[in-house]
Image (cartoon, grey):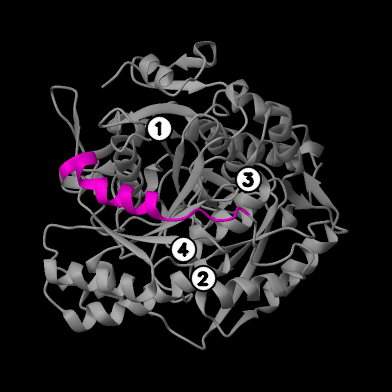
């Protein structure tokens, strides 16, 4: 591990803007941001298996490989949530020899950003109920602001509170789904952060008038709680490549991208900035373009789609318990899922690259089939073995990305903000998922009417959908066609600046699996934490 001051100096960050948080991490002041000079590379994926396909590992790998090829690369990632860490997926800092460090600390409390976001959210919730207690504020039946915590806990999805005051039903969302987290991912400076927090709609009066956080006087204190969390976190990869880790919205229930301020900071110092968007291109990738790029005024040069042999077999109909077994028929059938994402990417006008995250049981014959598929589609394909070999295992990956022409930088969004919300939702569903139509339930239509009356017009849409399928049904693998997407509820995130459309059975508070990952986590006598990563 390099001293964090040396990591900062390597990319030219001014020392007065780097605030060490110990020997191996630092906060970077926003005044260090300067005009962009670098190439932005987005890493997305085909629809994953339940365990994920190593998108973070591939992002880290590419940055390390580019550095070994003489490029000054920075990787810009999201902060891991404790929900999946202790749930089903384990840590979110890469894997093997392609990690960001200190991995254990990043996966746990890190610099406290997610705790600060949870606390700011909770403060607003407390001030809402305090107003109700004194018979002020919104109608208790029309309170929209739920509570948040950074943990999977299905028992908190629906709760009754206020037994000593205004009794009402509410619930908890995981912090990664909090609007405060979404705002943290999209603000530009402290003044913008406070203005966005003030716009948050917490409920309505009896006549339907919106009640906002600013009306309760909460925005100033919430901003104060987020003072340190505003600053991106500087760390490094296992090979010393500079890494920024900041912001943590999920892509299945939020917009799934690391913070806007982090990306802009990195673009001012790196030749290449490698960033990721959560889950498949149908979720995080689409939202990266239509929400983050629209807000930030940026546009990627190249998009990487992560594929794995096991994910191709999964979407080709193979038994999920036998994805390591040879199954050429399922492998070939699985390319239909990758086809859909390549077609979706083409509509944004950005060149694509396919990278195969190689697993130990992948056969050379299977990898050759993926290369043949890429040649047929006219798309570069690289096989990455950085999990086992570090940056040396990502050299082909770096070479294929370097050989890919950059986009023209002209934004091509999925829809116009002036379009009605049903048209925006339909545009995403048709072009990103291959759906026939979007069906709005009566409740969703009522939500949209209320949103428009509150002034929530001309905003982007953020689809909350399962990551396991192109449809709203996680059991439908592959590339289904001619299917409807049902939107059952729509929520206004006025501070973040988008509306969230909930589909299928998607939950904003996930539950733990029967045997959660938390059951294997241990603190050893040496002080090392074991079990945060799968296979650890």
Single out the mark in the foreground, 4 or 2: 2
Q: Which residue is label 2 attached to?
A: 344
Q: Label 2, label 3: how many angstroms apart (C-alpha)? A: 47 Å
Q: Residue, x 33% and y 42% (percent of image)?
A: 60
Q: Quadrant of residue 213?
A: top right
How many discs appear? 4
Residue 514: image location, x then y, percent: 26, 59
Residue 452: image location, x then y, percent: 81, 63
Q: Residues within 10 Å of mark 2 (few under 14, many from 20)?
A: many
User: Which stretch did the figure color magenta?
Assistant: 389-409
Within the magenta stretch, is there residue 124?
no
Q: Which residue is label 1 attached to?
A: 72
Single out the mark in the foreground, 3 or 1: 1
Task: Locate residue 240 relative to residue 479 in the image: left or right.
Answer: left
Residue 329: image location, x then y, percent: 20, 84
Q: Which mark is residue 104?
A: none
Q: Residue, x 58% and y 36% (percent of image)?
A: 264
Comes first in the chain, label 4 or label 3: 3
Single out the mark in the foreground, 1 or 2: 1
Q: Which mark is residue 281?
A: 4
Q: Which mark is residue 162?
A: 3
Marks 4 and 2: CB-CB under 8 Å?
yes
């Amino acid at each position: 591990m390099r001293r964090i001051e040396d990591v900062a100096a390597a990319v030219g960050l001014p020392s007065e803007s780097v605030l060490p948080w110990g020997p191996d991490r630092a906060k970077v002041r926003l005044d260090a941001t300067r005009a962009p000079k670098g190439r932005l590379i987005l890493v997305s994926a085909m629809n994953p298996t339940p365990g994920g396909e190593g998108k973070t590992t591939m992002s880290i790998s590419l940055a390390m490989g580019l550095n070994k090829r003489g490029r000054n690369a920075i990787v810009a990632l999201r902060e891991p949530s404790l929900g999946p860490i202790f749930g089903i997926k384990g840590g979110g800092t890469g894997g093997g020899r392609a990690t960001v460090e200190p991995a254990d600390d990043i996966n746990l409390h890190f610099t406290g950003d997610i705790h600060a976001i949870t606390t700011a959210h909770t403060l607003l919730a407390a001030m809402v109920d305090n107003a109700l207690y004194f018979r002020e504020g919104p109608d208790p039946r029309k309170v929209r602001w739920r509570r948040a915590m950074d943990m999977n806990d299905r028992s908190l999805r629906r709760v009754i509170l206020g037994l000593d005051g205004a009794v009402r039903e509410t619930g908890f969302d995981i912090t990664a789904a909090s609007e405060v987290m979404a705002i943290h991912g999209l603000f530009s400076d402290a003044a913008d952060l406070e203005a966005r927090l003030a716009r948050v709609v917490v409920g309505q009066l009896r006549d339907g008038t919106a009640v906002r956080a600013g009306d309760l006087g909460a925005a100033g204190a919430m901003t104060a709680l987020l003072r340190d969390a505003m600053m991106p976190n500087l760390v490094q990869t296992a090979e010393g490549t500079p890494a920024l880790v900041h912001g943590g919205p999920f892509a299945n229930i939020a917009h799934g991208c690391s913070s806007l301020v982090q990306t802009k900071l990195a673009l001012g110092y790196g030749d290449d900035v490698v960033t990721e968007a959560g889950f498949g291109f149908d979720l995080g990738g689409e939202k990266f373009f239509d929400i983050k790029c629209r807000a930030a005024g940026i546009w990627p040069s190249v998009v990487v789609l992560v594929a794995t042999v096991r994910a191709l077999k999964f979407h080709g109909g193979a038994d999920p318990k036998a994805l390591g077994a040879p199954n050429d028929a399922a492998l070939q059938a699985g390319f239909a899922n990758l086809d859909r994402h390549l077609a979706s990417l083409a509509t944004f006008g950005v060149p694509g690259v396919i990278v195969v995250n190689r697993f130990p049981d992948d056969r050379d014959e299977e990898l050759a089939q993926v290369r043949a598929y890429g040649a047929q589609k006219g798309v570069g394909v690289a096989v990455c073995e950085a999990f086992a070999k570090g940056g040396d295992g990502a050299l082909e990956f770096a070479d294929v990305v370097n050989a890919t022409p950059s986009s023209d930088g002209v934004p091509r969004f999925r829809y116009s903000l002036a379009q009605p919300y049903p048209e925006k939702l339909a545009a995403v569903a048709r072009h990103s998922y291959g759906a026939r139509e979007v069906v709005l339930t009566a409740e969703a239509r009522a939500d949209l009417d209320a949103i428009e009356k509150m002034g929530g017009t001309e905003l982007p849409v953020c689809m909350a959908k399962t990551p396991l399928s192109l449809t709203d049904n996680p059991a439908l693998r592959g590339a289904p066609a001619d299917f409807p997407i049902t939107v059952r509820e729509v929520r206004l995130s006025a501070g973040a600046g988008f509306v969230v459309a909930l589909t299928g059975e998607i939950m904003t508070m996930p539950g733990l699996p029967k045997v959660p990952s938390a059951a294997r986590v241990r603190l050893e006598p040496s002080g090392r934490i074991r079990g945060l990563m799968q296979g650890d």
